[in-house]
């Protein structure tokens, strides 16, 4: 894992001129930029984010990557705002592009694969599947494929679902944001740094659970047996 991370950090160095440390917990948000996916949700409370970014006991590194649609001006603005923010912090990076090679490298780099869609907007979320296969721990709102995979604290970390149907959008966003920070501060980072053996168990359990249920061999087998016979 450390070797793969060092190799993946070359992408950060090439694009941003920053040298990331494989001993520091690396959080990656990488996929298509879209409003409902809320790529910038951690920046909505800059006080809490900056506290994490300057924490000496539990340091973090955050990488964003992805592409907005050409005419999605709101998503383009979000991307540009993250770029500007990353210039102020040595442990934040925004990578342009998200072709197959970069996607592969970022999944190998990630300790935590962050997924923040607004429930119930996410159709699937396949990036989290391959991230788990690459040894990243999924950290997500409870939507898409995660609902079939996640065992909170065992193979992933999940924002506890709420009665979103009766929430206004800003209430849902605040609920999810606060729980994301709480889980990072109280569960993920203490486990990663203080209990590395426990962290490795979560990594291995995620790799084990994702292997058979979400691999393409199972999908092709189901298509053959259920649809085409």
Image (cartoon, rainbow, N blue to C red):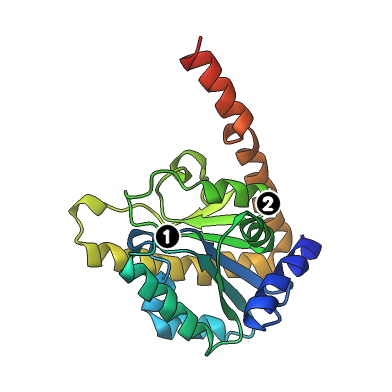
Spot the residue most to the bottom: 88
Q: Of the residues under marks 2 and 1, which one precedes in the sequence?
A: 1
- The numbered dot on residue 116 is 1
Residue 80 in the image: above or below residue 169? below
What residue did someone put label 2 on?
A: 134
Q: Can you name the residue that lies furthest to the right here? A: 3
Q: Is 8 positioned to the left or the right of 36 in the image?
A: right
**Residue displayed at 42% across by 86% down:** 47
Residue at the image position 69 percent from the left and 77 percent from the top: 14
SS for dot 2: loop
Disc ID at residue 21: none
Mark 1 surroundings: few (<14), some (14-19) or many (≥20) residues within 10 A: many
Q: Position of residue 154 (x, y in %)?
A: 59, 49
**Along the line of sight, the residue nearer the viewer: 24 or 198:** 24
Q: Classify 204 as above or below 217.
A: below
Count of labels shown?
A: 2
Q: Which of 226/75 is in front?
A: 75
Name the secondary structure under disc 1. Answer: loop
42 w.r.t. 84: above or below? above
**Left or right of 211, for residue 46:** left
Residue 98 lies, in percent from the top left, at 56, 61
Q: Where on the picture, by quarter, is residue 197? A: bottom right
On the image, the x and y values in percent for residue 85 come to 47, 84
């Amino acid at each position: 894992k450390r070797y793969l991370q060092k190799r993946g950090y070359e992408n950060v160095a090439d694009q941003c001129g920053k040298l990331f440390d494989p001993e520091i917990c690396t959080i990656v948000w990488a996929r298509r930029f879209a409003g409902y996916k809320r790529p910038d949700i951690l920046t909505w409370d800059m006080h809490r984010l900056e506290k994490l970014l300057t924490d000496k006991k539990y340091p973090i590194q955050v990488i964003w990557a992805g592409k907005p649609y050409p005419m999605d001006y709101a998503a383009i603005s979000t991307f540009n705002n993250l770029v500007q923010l990353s210039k102020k912090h040595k442990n934040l990076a925004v990578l342009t592009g998200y072709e197959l090679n970069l996607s592969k490298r970022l999944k190998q780099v990630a300790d935590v694969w962050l997924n923040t869609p607004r429930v119930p907007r996410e159709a699937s979320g396949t990036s989290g599947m391959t991230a788990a296969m690459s040894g990243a721990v999924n950290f997500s709102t409870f939507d898409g494929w995660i609902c079939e995979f996640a065992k909170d604290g065992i193979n992933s970390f999940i924002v506890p679902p709420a009665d979103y149907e009766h929430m206004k959008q800003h209430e849902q966003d605040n609920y999810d944001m606060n729980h994301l920070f709480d889980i990072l501060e109280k569960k993920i980072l203490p486990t990663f740094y203080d209990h590395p053996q426990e962290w490795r168990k979560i990594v291995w359990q995620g790799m084990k659970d994702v292997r058979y249920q979400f691999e393409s061999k199972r999908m092709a087998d189901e298509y053959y047996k259920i649809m085409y016979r």
